[in-house]
Amino acid sequence: GIDQLKRYDAAYIGNTSEKVLYLTFDAGYENGCTEKILDTLQKHNVKAAFFLVGNYIEKNADLVRRMAEEGHLVCNHTAKHPDMSRITDKTLFCKQLSALEKVYADCTGREMAPFYRPPEGRFSKQNLRYAEEEGYTTVFWSYAYADWDNNRQPDPERAIAQILAHTHPGMVILLHPTSATNAKIMDRLLTAWEQDGYRFGSLEELRK
């Protein structure tokens, strides 16, 4: 369980006795919603973590540079989004991480933040160990909701109610920036969390 994750410098939740939450976004592709989300984060001066794949960075260099410049963490979601739990060879595992680091460095001139999220959350204990040996903290999530299907976007009112109902101290929330609903509700969501006394933490706090 949790102790096992900690042993490998992996995390899915923060300090549950503090009103803190960690905003994380997983982006496999871009469909025009991320800019609005970044605008809203900027308006609230909230920093988030974006887990990106290779072709996202290659196709959306300006957005990725903006994420970095505005102080968000740009993190590793692998180069090609494979099922990492099926990769047992350390060299192949590391290649998925290092290939993305290179794409990111070419795009921004910066080093990628040391956080890794396996595609679809699929992992093996061996994967956790490999990531740790490469200096990465593996980050899962404690709450996600059905926001990824563009043809079935959740109703904004219901989405806000659902997210707020599930908000808990130490929450690591997984959102998809492809979601039109998320772009629509972000301002109200951040405001509601702020009014409820939450602060927005950096994943750096989850490192061992």
Image (cartoon, rainbow, N blue to C red):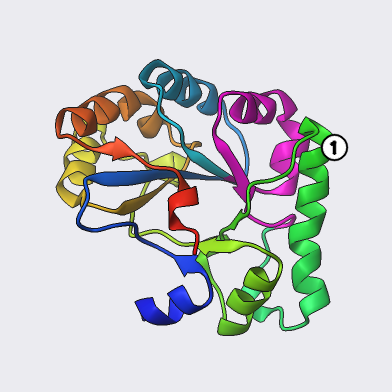
Q: Where does the image place residue 170, in percent across and percent down from the top left?
A: 28, 53
Report the magenta residues as a range.
Answer: 51-80
Q: Secondary structure at mark 1?
A: helix
In the rendered image of this protein, does residue 64 appear above or below residue 13? above
| Left or right: 97 as drawn, with respect to 43 | right
Q: Position of residue 88 (x, y in %)?
A: 72, 83
Residue type, numbered disc 1: Asp
Q: Is residue 16 left or right of residue 99?
A: left
The residue lying toward the viewer, choosing from 85 and 171, is: 171
Q: Is residue 75 magenta?
A: yes
Q: Residue at x 35, y 24 (%)?
A: 184
Taking 155 as reference, is 99 left or right?
right
Q: Is residue 58 above or below residue 61?
A: below
* Residue at the (19%, 42%) spot, across then down: 164
> Which residue is painted at 20% across and 52% down in the image?
168
Would residue 188 be counted in the magenta stretch? Answer: no
- Mark 1 lies on residue: 106
